[in-house]
Image (tube, grey):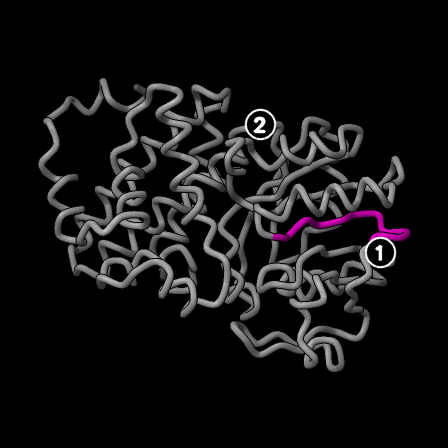
Amino acid sequence: MKLTVLGAGCWGLTLAKLLSGNFEEICVWGRTQDLSEELIKYRKTSKPLEVQLDDNVQITDDLKKAVRASEIILLVVATSGIRPVCRQLKEIGLSDNQILVNLSKGLELPSLKRMSEVIKDELPSSKLALLSGPTLAKEILNGCPTGACVASDDMQTAEFVQKHLSVPSKFRLYTNSDVIGVELGGSLKNVIAIASGFADAMKLGDNCRGTLLTRGMAEIVRVSTVLGANPSTLYGLSGMGDLIATCSSPFSRNFSVGYMLGQGKKIDDILKELGSVAEGVKTSKALCELAKKLGIEVPVSSAIYEAVYTDITPEEVLNKLMNRKLKKEDEYQLK
């Protein structure tokens, strides 16, 4: 059985390492400019994470070769690359039994579409699932256990992916039919993770972190339920579980972005220093545009959007959030 991983970044390589015992063959595809000589020759990378891939893993920049005869294809490219890659897959032509599993978390700009919507635009007849949950790559590489969920409109597809991507004692997967909830929970929490890192850098304390996570979760629920998500999904692995992990770990790229913003650094310098994609940066813009379109208040997310895209100081961000008009909590949870 063959697995294809589209995307040779940290998460893609981590998955290739994690799942090497589940498949006879794994093929990792990346753009030519993204494949280092070290990775091609030795199946190894040392930046930004150290990963040594197993002998059954191949590396290629040939997309057609990568997906040929593969039962499961993991989409682990940046959200901005999902549509272009799907267009290439459309030209190649996928068979009816090949399953696409999206692991990219974010919203497309300027369309504001979820990634599953983008994939269906380009590959309307494809078998599609998505995987989301608390999955910090560094911890998984260190052998730490975690759980995540596989969502699909077709439960047979979800169960097939669950069976073949679960790893005993390390990677426990649950199925879920709420595609919208799973997808939005995993995408929108990245913005709140930036807020958490921001507060940590300013040494605002654990009370503040608790407040941010709670109010941030309220924003995620308000937006997601209006779009059709089941609220209970958002308090599961892809929502609350992922939120807790990414809002409290220096291994989270979004947390790291927020931490450096809280130190007063500018976003261009931060992304250059980080050397990898932090989806929460663009998602903050998409989320604020989406919330405005829906007529929903998202003060924490709006503050992060300002911190990322304007010259506002960390102190001004804090003051704007803390000195807003006072409200009732119960009337504000889902409104």
Quadrant housing the C terminus? top left
Residue type highlighted by circle 1: Lys
Viewer can see residue 59: yes
Q: Residue at x 16, y 39 (%)?
A: 321
Q: On residue 189, which mark appears?
A: none
Rate crowding at label 1 as few (under 14), some (14 to 19) or many (20 or more) other CA atoms within 10 Å: some
SS label for mark 1 = strand
Q: Which residue is mark 2?
A: 178
Q: Residue at x 39, y 39 (%)?
A: 285
Between 232 and 292, the one nearer to me in the picture: 292
Viewer can see residue 249: no
Q: How many marks?
A: 2
Quadrant housing the N terminus? bottom right
Residue 313 x %, y %: 17, 53
Q: Which residue is mark 1?
A: 2
In the rendered structure, does residue 24 fall within the stretch colored magenta?
no
26 left or right, relative to 179: right
Between 169 and 322, the one nearer to me in the picture: 322
Quarter residue 298 falls in = top left
294 left or right, relative to 28: left
Between 244 and 222, the one nearer to me in the picture: 222
Residue 238 x %, y %: 50, 41
Q: Earlier in the sequence, mark 1 or mark 2?
A: 1
Magenta residues (range): 67-77
Residue 312 x %, y %: 20, 49
Q: Please, is residue 294 above or below residue 28 in the view?
A: above
